[in-house]
Image (spheres, helix red, strand yellow):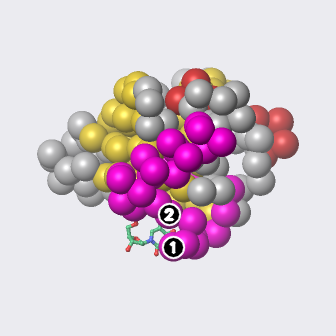
Amino acid sequence: MKDCVPNIYNCSVLELTRIHNPSGNITIVQSESVLPFDVRRVYYLYDVPGGSERGGHAHKVLQQLIVAASGSFDVILDDGTMKKTVHLNRPNYGLLIVPGIWREIINFSSGAICLVLASERYNPSDYIRDYSDFKKIKDLADAG
Ligand code: TYD
């Protein structure tokens, strides 16, 4: 695989600043110091029924930081060649996902909140929702 084609090892778990306080902790995410992008959109998944799977797509340009703001879940990362599963269960850790990575989010605990900080506004044309299309794009990029 060529170095310039994003792979799962370009995705990493970042430890976020946590200000500990006996009456409640604070975690801060600042664009310039922590994230390699400016945050243009924030959304969160919640009330996810047990057994549900979310994600099931890749993005062409969008970068994201995914945080288990409450509870836990697993994120399966797939670059078309390699896969890895990241378990998120702490509000002061976030998974940075670069473009060109297929992701699925599974095993939501009861009450889990999946907080997403995104580099772009919502744009349906930035999604690759068909896995065979994703594989074709990745195979072409790897060959090129
Ligand atoms: P989708 O991104 O497919 O959710 P997930 O990857 O978590 O399974 O989005 C689900 C629906 O919500 C889809 O109809 C698009 C809509 N949506 C927006 O309108 N704006 C947004 O910012 C997001 C994330 C989703």
Q: Is residue 127 magenta?
A: yes
Asked whether, in this view, residue 39 is left or right of residue 139, the answer is right
Q: Does any atom of ligand 1 lie closer than 8 Å to the CB of label 1?
A: yes
Q: Residue furthest front?
A: 143
Q: Name the secondary structure under disc 1.
A: helix
Amino acid of disc 2: Tyr
Q: Position of residue 124 (x, y in %)?
A: 51, 73
- Toward the left, the furthest residue is 51
Q: Nearer the viewer, residue 127 or 88?
A: 127
Label 2 element class: strand
Front in this rendered view, residue 73 or 58: 58
Q: Is residue 92 visible?
A: no
Q: Nearer the viewer, residue 5 or 88?
A: 5
- Say which residue appears at 36% left-offset and 52% top-offset: 131
- Quadrant position of the C terminus in the picture: top right
Is residue 110 something one can see in this rendering? yes
- Residue at image coords 76%, 48%: 37
Q: Please indicate whether residue 55 sits to the left or right of residue 128 in the image.
A: left
Q: Residues within 10 Å of mark 2 (few under 14, many from 20)?
A: some
* Rendered image: mark on residue 124: 1
Expressed as whole percent of the image width and height from the top left, the position of residue 47 reads 27, 57
Q: Which residue is the site of mark 2?
A: 127
Q: Is residue 103 left or right of residue 32?
A: left
Whether 108 is drawn above or below 22: the answer is below
* Dots 1, 2 in contact, CB < 8 A: yes
In three-dimensional space, the C-alpha distance between marks 1 and 2, rounded to whole angstroms, equals 6 Å
Type of amino acid under label 1: Pro
The residue drawn where x is 50% and y is 42% is 139
Residue farthest to the right, as pictured: 32
- Magenta stretch? 115-144
At a point 40% along the width and 28% down the height, the residue shown is 83
